[in-house]
Image (cartoon, rainbow, N blue to C red):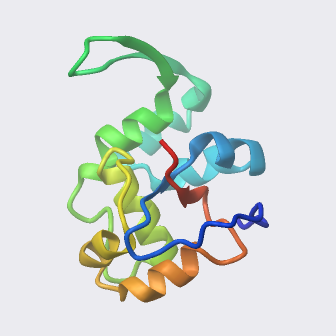
Amino acid sequence: MSETKQFSFIKPTLQTLYHIDFDWWKSHDSNWHIFLFGCLCDEHQKIFEQGADNVMIDWVDPETAEITLVDGLQTVLMNHCAKLPNFVTPNTTMIDAIFRVFLANGNNPMTPVELSQKIGKPAETILRTLSGLQVYKGIRPFHG
């Protein structure tokens, strides 16, 4: 999925933090759930193919014990499937690998340098891709 970015006066650098902006992605791509389904492990694909892909579940923050209503598919993907050893492989495309790294690390913001260390692609290439005119899979600069 690609989308034209809003104009910004701030030019991203190798130290700019990025993350998956799920709110942006959900509002710009009606197929976002289908893509996430494809990232599930075999075990969870079988569970979610029965139509459970729109299930909201209670999630307890391990640090604050705060309970939040979250998307079930997204939560299972990030807390189980993304932790499996072959979630990112050498054959995974760069954008998919970046997306999957964010899923595996709980969507904690990362710089192109940190992403480079995880996926083995040059940080400059990652920066050029993520700071171009298109937004890929909701991966955007973190403003938090």
Q: Residue at x 74, y 64 (%)?
A: 5
Q: Quadrant of the N terminus?
A: bottom right
Say whether residue 119 is left or right of residue 94.
Answer: left
Q: Would residue 55 appear left or right of 76 to someone viewing this image?
A: right
Q: Residue furthest front?
A: 9
Residue 68 picture location, percent across and down: 44, 15
User: In the picture provided, is 28 more to the left or to the right than 132?
Assistant: right
Please tell me which residue lies in front, 28 or 48.
Answer: 28
Query: Looking at this view, is 36 or 126 the one in front?
Result: 126
Residue 111 location (% of width, % of height): 37, 66
Q: Position of residue 71 (x, y in %)?
A: 52, 28
Question: On screen, 1 above or below 116?
Answer: above
- In this rendered view, identify the residue nearer to me: 69 or 114: 114
User: 98 and 6: which one is in front?
Assistant: 6
**Percent from the top left, x then y, of residue 18?**
46, 59
x 42%, y 60%: residue: 17
Q: Is residue 61 above or below residue 47?
A: above
Callout count: 0
> Residue at 40% across / 60% down in the picture?
100
Q: Is residue 97 above or below residue 32?
A: below
Q: Residue at x 48, y 79 (%)?
A: 127
Quadrant position of residue 86? bottom left
Choose top left, top right, bottom left or bottom right for residue 67: top left
* In the depicted structure, whether residue 48 falls above or below residue 18: above
